[in-house]
Image: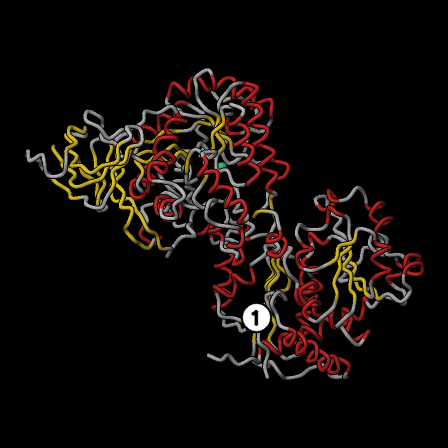
Amino acid sequence: MRTRLKNISVCDPVQNINDKYDILIENGVITGLSAPGSDSSGADREIDFTGCVAVPGFFDMHVHLREPGREDKETVITGCNSAARGGFTGVACMPNTTPAIDSAETVHFIRMKAEKHLVDVHPVAAATLGRKGETLSPIAELSEAGAVAFSDDGVAIKTAAILRRVMEYANMFDRPVIEHCEDDSLAGGAMNEGFNSTIFGLSSVPPIAEELTVARDIMMAEYTGARVHIAHISTKNAIDLVRQGKAKGIKVTAEVTPHHFTLTDDMLAGYDTNYKMNPPLRTAEDVAAAVEGLRDGTIDCIASDHAPHTLEEKEMEFEYAPNGILGLETQVGITLTELYHNNILSLEQIVEKLAINPRKILGLEIPSIKEGAVANITILDPESEWQFDSSKMKSKSFNTPFHGTNYKGCAKAVINKGQIYHNDTFSTI
Amino acid sequence: MQIGIKHLLGLQGVSANDIQMLLDTATTFKQVLERPIKKVPTLQGKTVVNLFYENSTRTRISFELAEKRLSADAVNFSVSGSSVSKGETFKDTVRNIEAMKVDMIVVRHASAGVPLYLTKICKSIVINAGDGIHEHPTQALLDMFSIREKTGKLEGLKVCIVGDIAHSRVALSNIFGLKAMGAHVSLCGPATMIPRGIENLGVKVYTDIDKAMKENDVLNVLRIQLERKAREYFPSVREYHQFYGITQERIDRNNKDILILHPGPINRGVEITSDVADGPNQIILDQVTNGVAVRMSILYLLGTRTSEE
Ligand SMILES: [Zn+2]
């Protein structure tokens, strides 16, 4: 199978190239990069990508695929379809499933489910058994089975004593600990604490619940020498703590979700449960700090925290509805609209946040667009204007606050494992 | 002239005109309540459902009486606990009720925002009888009615709300309503019970009850929740009573003309002592009587409102 992608710009910060090419792909491997029109050898298929940019395949390091346990919300396959549609060639899935991903069998089960899919799925395993914060999960065995990181996501690792041991143990395998930072004794509210929670009359969680745990985790990373990755960072002070930690040389990295760098808790005035997530939406000051954190490199990557829930669950009263929104199919649109077109990040920087840094953090091979490399590519159309329609999503769920939003910039196609997803269909390449 | 609002979801954003009309109409209904036959045919043929997801016998009975005295058909639908434990979703419950052709829904719920949500999923007129720790507009209206009845005015009056402001639905509605009517509103309670950012609403915050009593004309004393969870906010009932309890001795020492309100039910000996609860400064039972008149006023003005569409 020979496929030629024609008239496509290539943006690959690793090789430092940003130019226009025809890309020849043979059986999933890049075999030629040539000036547009210069290679006239035959191909089984040619696709014209004028106006588009090929970048190393995007990777979302924080998604909830819900399998095993809640296949009514999402499965590995529907989640992967959603990822492909959203422009991702790989995801890391969180362990808060039922049962939790705390055994090699469950890691194998998930990897097997995704084996034939275009999208790479790398399980993050639970740091403690059942995510209960009491006993270490079999970290060595899980690493061997393919777990790329350890986390009790949904909650922070319960005590400093267990955190310390998880860090020391995971560090032997050079696996990072991913922390959902929230002090349990201050947790439990339905929104961010502040003036808005006061006038909306909703239970609230103070920003310091996140910040205290971020501080604890960074200090523990310094003490143990282990790597800690702060998931879905959302407050200004937490971002400052990461900035200070990095300046001290501590091995701390951080991700932010598109909703946390664009939306504020003002959105909760209508009590729409599609704006309910954990960490909650914060203030305009926090949003500005997240954007600045992305700009100055304090925040290493963008991740969606894709969290599917059924319609019935999200239609519950605000206090009772579950936390979380979908993100895989809006992430690229939001990022290009808000960060690229607003001149906050260059395309190279966006590729770092969405393709390179997440894989670096998880110790995965970084795809490159060059001759001889396996084709792991996201094709962007940065100028295309489109409106997001939640009814057309590939995810099994619909819980998104972004229905009807207009974006500039989208993912046109993804290529990985000898397959291409283009025009809503998968085919071999 | 008819009332501007279509539903009574809260007092935030409700105009002084609407509040004035609600209070003035309540005055008329209070006269009806003084008659031997306390019933008018105003809402004959209308069906009102009291949808209570929280146990609140007093508020429900007050609404029920108001509905019956306006000749409406009143139906009670009580659900204990959340819809989560019940199996049926809130939306399904509401759709079932609406399928029975009702005109108005009076709703009490532990989750803020439910009255607003109701307006989105059904066509009935919605009256908020308390949502979470958000608003309880009919309570605030009856408090304002009672203050106005006693003092003759609201404008320029200094009203202080005392107690657990952070977990009160009464406080926020009183702040919005009283401020719309030109009163000066302040709050008094332990720092653990003052919600963040509340001063941005233009209210003064006291932690010293004696100072608050000296500087205000009216105290609206909130009930202290005695459940375990609420108890995390103060060391002991004894200490709360010592530092924030309204006693006759405090009234005599600080401001012997001060007017005392309490939304009930009273914890005697905790936030208020018996000598005050039964004493000359309080209007606690007037509030209960006025509650029926005020709720008649709301039901009447919203139930007879003709939509412009
Ligand atoms: Zn999380």
Does the beta carbon at disc 1 come under 8 Å from ligand 1? no
On the rendered structure, is B156 left or right of A209? right
- Up-down: is A261 above or below B29? above
Q: Residue A424, how many percent across, how many down? A: 23, 46
Between A286 and B127, the residue placed more toward the observer is: A286
Identity of the residue furthest to the top in this view: A172
Q: Is residue B308 left or right of residue A39?
A: right
Tell me the residue at 59%/81% (across/down).
Answer: B2
Judge from the rendering whether residue A96 lies leftward or rightward of residue B6; answer left or right. Answer: left
In the rendered image, residue B264, in percent from the top left (x then y), is placed at 77, 61
Where is residue A141, by image quadrant?
A: top left
In this rendering, position of residue B169 left or right of residue A420: right
Instruction: Work out which quarter of the rendered image holds the N terminus of chain B and state it.
Output: bottom right
Residue ID for mark 1: B7
Mark 1 Cα within 10 Å, few/some/many (few <14, many 20+)?
A: many
Chain identity of mark 1: B
Locate residue A70: give its quadrant.
Answer: top left
The residue that appears at 40% across and 24% down in the rendered structure is: A147
Q: Which residue is pictured at 62% across the width and 59% down the height?
A: B131
Q: How many marks?
A: 1
Give residue A202's position: percent from left, percent from top.
Answer: 60, 52
- The residue tagged with tag 1: helix, strand or loop? loop
Residue B146, compared with residue B254, is above or below; it is below
Compared with A146, A426 (above or below) is below
Colour scheme in use: secondary structure
- Pick whichever, A4 or B232, lies toward us: A4
Which residue is drawn at the image coordinates 70% and 76% (left, top)? B23
Question: Residue A28, percent across and down?
Answer: 19, 30
Question: Quarter of the image holding residue B69?
Answer: bottom right
* Closer-to-camera residue (A91/A256): A256
Amino acid at dot 1: His
